[in-house]
Each structure stands twice: as C-alpha cells, then as structure tokens.
Amino acid sequence: MPATPGTGPLPSARRPRPGVRAVSPVAPGGPSSPGSSPLDVDEAVFDVVERIPAGRVSTYGAVGRLVGVGPRRVARALAQGGGAVPWHRVVRADGSAAQAVRVEQLGLLAAEGVPVRNGRVDLAAVGWP
C-alpha cells in the first residue's frame, strides 16, 4: 500500500542527526525558517561572505553556522551565484580549495596575502570569524 504524502519518516536530509545541535539563523524568522525561499538563503550566505575581510578566510561550515544551513548549501549558493562576492575566501574545513576552482582560488588568496602551504590555508592563522 503506498504511503500517504506527509507521513512516515523524514527524508534523510531533514532527519535530526545525533549529537548535532541546531544553530539559529542570522535573525529570527531568517533564511533557514520554514517557507523561506532558496534566494533568501543565498542572500544570507552572500551577506556573510561579504563580511570576511581581505586576507582572512572562513569555511563552508562556519558560514553555514552563521546562516543556519549546512556547508553543502553554502557551497551551492556560492557555486550558483556567488561571483559578485569574495567567494574565494571560503574554503573547506581542512583549509583546502574546492577542486574545480583550486588554481584560481589559491591565486586570489595569495594575492590578498593569505599564506598557502601545500595547497592549504592555515585556518588557525587566518580563519574568520
């Protein structure tokens, strides 16, 4: 018998994960609240990324925590429409650049004086926030 829409377990992407604490969005009723549009989330991501100072970097996860979304959602926003913001200041949790834009991203970071060693940024030295 087919399941009735709206019943049964949540899709895995929406299931709470053990040990993971929910993070508040930027503002109450902000971009991660139910019913918000993907464009609202994108704009919130762009707003945070625009605040990262030149010479500093953040991670997809750190930006996501500030916005109230996961790191993959941050990456998607930047990949699809982040060209007008300093997208290159957002790196992976290990300090490495995204493979598809690695050379360009590391070049832009080096031009801002961000130390890069073995293809990774030292997050302890230049991490933000």
Image (cartoon, helix red, strand yellow):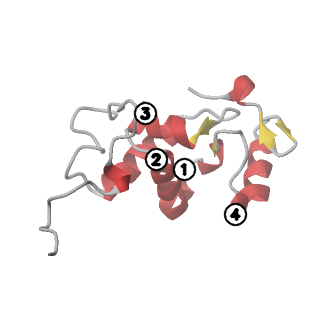
**Residue extending furthest front?**
1
Q: In the rendered view, tell whether residue 120 sits above or below residue 76.
A: above
Crowd class of label 3 (few under 14; some 14 to 19; many from 20; radius 10 Å): some
Based on the displayed image, in which of its 4 quarters is residue 55 positioned? top right
Instruction: Return the mark for residue 66.
Output: 3
Q: Amino acid at mark 3?
A: Leu
Give the residue at x 79% y 57%: 103
Mark 4–mark 2 Cα distance, whole angstroms, equals: 20 Å
The numbered dot on residue 46 is 2
Q: Which of the two discs, 4 and 2, sits closer to the camera? A: 4
Q: Give whichever of discs 1 and 4 has the lower sequence position.
A: 1
* Relative to 2, residue 73 above or below: above
Location of the C terminus (image quadrant): top right
Q: Which residue occupies 74% across, 24% down?
A: 125
Q: Which mark is residue 121?
A: none
Pointer 1 residue = 85
Which residue of the protein is positioned furthest toward the left in this rendering? 4
Disc 2 crowd, CA 10 A, few/some/many (<14, 14-19, 20+): many
Q: Earlier in the sequence, mark 2 or mark 3?
A: 2
Q: Nearer the viewer, mark 1 or mark 3?
A: 3
Label 1, label 3: how far apart the Cα atoms are: 17 Å
Asked if disc 1 and disc 4 are in contact, CB closer than 8 Å, the reply is no
Front residue of 109/58: it is 58
According to the picture, the residue beneath numbered tag 4 turns out to be 100
